[in-house]
Amino acid sequence: MYITNDIRYIGVNDHKVDLFEGQYAVPNGMAYNSYLILDEKTAVMDTVDKNFTEEWIANIRRELDGKKLDYLVVQHMEPDHAGSIAAFLQEFENTTVVSSQKAFNMMKAFFGTEYAERRVVVGEGSTLELGKHTLTFVTAPMVHWPEVIVTYDSCDKVLFSADGFGKFGALDAEEEWEDEARRYYIGIVGKYGPQVQALLKKAAGLDIAAICPLHGPVLTENLGYYLNLYDTWSSYRPEEEGVVIAYTSVYGHTREAALLLAEKLQEKGCPAVKVYDLARSDMAAAVADAFRYSKLVLATTTYNADIFPFMKEFIHHLTERSYQKRTVGMIENGSWAPMAVKVMNKMLEGSKELTFTQNNVKILSALNDESRAQIEALASELA
Ligand code: FEO
């Protein structure tokens, strides 16, 4: 497949994977992208997951069409991209590996060798001349591992962005970019907002016609839209006004409160209301929406003098991704000693720029007039 006249897509679609990175549900599979640049010298950009080595090497051979393969550029060492390095270097015995020193250190750990006899170590601003195409390497530490480099081809104005601008989903799946890109970004890179901001600043100085990520489609149009979303996500600003209600419920009473709050918010004209039962929803989707919207209500039961496990996990996902700059309300339930609000406040005390609502809701087992009035007050405050 042609990306430009000289750049070919040689990646693969994975429809066998159930949980990407061992935790993210990917109902539409996953793409491991790889690209071949054809010039006086030839270069492959990254490898693929080791389950797809043969298919990928066949793609390379087809597009190479008998030409010599000069370079393998390794931008990122996570095994979804680096899993086929060793097999590739056995197959292409005269190809030189181009990567960062940190990546070569990881190759030693993964494969037992740093390929000292057949490598070029590159760093910030290093270049690789292929002929018409000059590749310039830009370090992107923690986007999403420390060894990551991204690569700019000034000839075709292409940014090879490693994990950046990727999404869940194989390339042959029909789905919108935004939701699965957000779930991917928040889940996988969300902790590293400042590092993504640093990379965006470097990218701002480049004339970019296409972004070639390691997952998801090549982006060629309306690039400002994608860059703006990445700026919003990595600066932790809410994307939209709206309320996410995340709840756990043992016998349905907390659920009833969450749904009543959702109904009240809708009645009051709240622009978006999303409700997640954390025990039954995709946790990564709930986390992504918590970052998407401006307000969040956490509704849970007191449990073993703590909070219900799914809520604990949810809040942990938020705090480890630097959840901030939003409004948070709480609903607690407890049959004899409700303390969920206290526990949740404690869990969020290190989070920056959170505004907590004046009106929280306390349920003693089941809703009554008093707790219904509290829900009304919380809805009014949030709407
Ligand atoms: Fe797609 Fe961080 O690997």
Image (tube, rainbow, N blue to C red):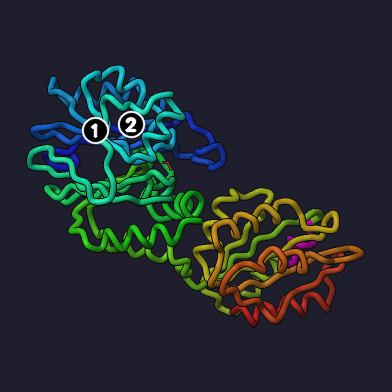
Answer few, some or many: residues within 10 Å of disc 2's Cα (few below 14, many 20 plus, some between 14 and 19): many
Image location (x, y in percent) of residue 90:
31, 17
274 vs 21: above or below: below
Task: Name which quarter of the figure residue 92 lies in.
Answer: top left
Point 27% across, 59% down: residue: 203
| 254 drawn magenta | yes
Asked whether 45 or 113 is in front, the reply is: 113
Res. 157 visible in picture: yes
Image location (x, y in percent) of residue 131:
8, 38
Image location (x, y in percent) of residue 183:
48, 52
Task: Name which quarter of the figure residue 363 lies in.
Answer: bottom right
Q: Horizontal placement of 353 versus 248: left or right?
A: left
Separation of disc 1 and disc 2 at Cα?
8 Å
Query: Furthest residue to the front?
Result: 116
Q: Which residue is mark 1?
A: 44
45 vs 162: above or below: above
Find out whether the residues at labels 1 and 2 contact each other: C-beta distance under 8 Å.
Answer: yes
- Magenta span: helix, strand or loop, mainly? helix
Rendered-image quadrant of the C terminus: bottom right
Query: Mark 1: which secondary structure?
Result: strand
Q: Which residue is mark 2?
A: 47
Q: Horizontal placement of 162 versus 64: left or right?
A: right
Task: Find the magenta span and give its range.
Answer: 252-257
Identify the amino acid type marked 1.
Answer: Val
Identify the amino acid type marked 2.
Answer: Thr
Task: Name which quarter of the figure residue 105 lies in.
Answer: top left
227 vs 295: above or below: above
Determine if the C-beta at disc 2 is less than 8 A from ligand 1: no
Point 12% across, 32% down: residue: 41
Tell me the quadrant of ligand 1. Answer: top left
Q: Name the disc covering residue 342, or none.
A: none
